[in-house]
Amino acid sequence: MFKVTDSAIRDAYLYLRSLPPFTRWNLPPAGDCTFGLLVGASHHAEYVKDGKHLILVNADTHITLTDMLMSVAHEMCHQRQEILGRLPLVKDSHNAEFRRMAKQVCSAMGWDLQKF
């Protein structure tokens, strides 16, 4: 059975970072990021810039590898917004720029944009 762990999140980041469109986004190496479990939350994942780039995934809401990969990729879109200096300060940061990146990712990965 699939299990979300810190190392699984890191490995997902490494794998996704090696694929387009992420290869063109100048994302930081995994060593400049922190990966962890999102505990006690109702949402699936979270990106935070607090010194390092932090990507958290909720193990309780991810039952398949594809679910986790999609969530890590989703947070990498927010990471890209932060790197560009355009991550909205509001909680709902799924603006036009995010939706454009999400469309690129889903098209490249064959994922359903509505589930992303």
Image (tube, rainbow, N blue to C red):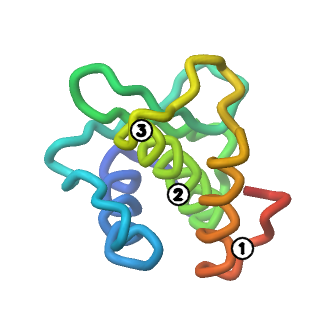
Element assignment for label 3: strand
Q: Which residue is mark 2?
A: 73
- Report, in whole angstroms, how far the alpha carbon at label 1 lies from the one at label 3: 20 Å
Q: Position of residue 46 (x, y in %)?
A: 54, 32
Give the mark nearer the N terminus: 1 vs 3.
3
Label number found at residue 9:
none
Q: Residue furthest left?
A: 31
Element assignment for label 2: helix
Q: Which amino acid type corresponds to the residue marked 3 in the rendered image?
A: Ile
- Report, in whole angstroms, how far the alpha carbon at label 2 lies from the one at label 1: 11 Å
- Determine the residue positioned at 37% across, 62% down: 25
- Determine the residue positioned at 66% across, 20% down: 91
Q: Which amino acid type corresponds to the residue marked 2 in the rendered image?
A: Ala
- Asked if marks 2 and 1 touch (Cβ < 8 Å), the reply is yes
Is residue 89 toward the left or the right of residue 18 in the image? right
The relative height of residue 35 versus residue 99 in the rendered view (above or below) is above
Q: Position of residue 17 (x, y in %)?
A: 35, 67
- Determine the residue positioned at 53% across, 57% down: 73
Q: Nearer the viewer, residue 100 or 70?
A: 100
Give the mark nearer the N terminus: 3 vs 2.
3
Q: Residues within 10 Å of mark 3 (few under 14, many from 20)?
A: many
Q: Which residue is mark 3?
A: 55
Element assignment for label 1: loop
Is residue 11 toward the left or the right of residue 56 in the image? left
- Which quarter shows the C terminus? bottom right
Q: Which residue is mark 1?
A: 111
Q: Nearer the viewer, residue 45 or 22?
A: 22
- Asked if marks 3 and 2 touch (Cβ < 8 Å), the reply is no
Give the mark nearer the N terminus: 2 vs 1.
2
Q: Residues within 10 Å of mark 2 (few under 14, many from 20)?
A: many
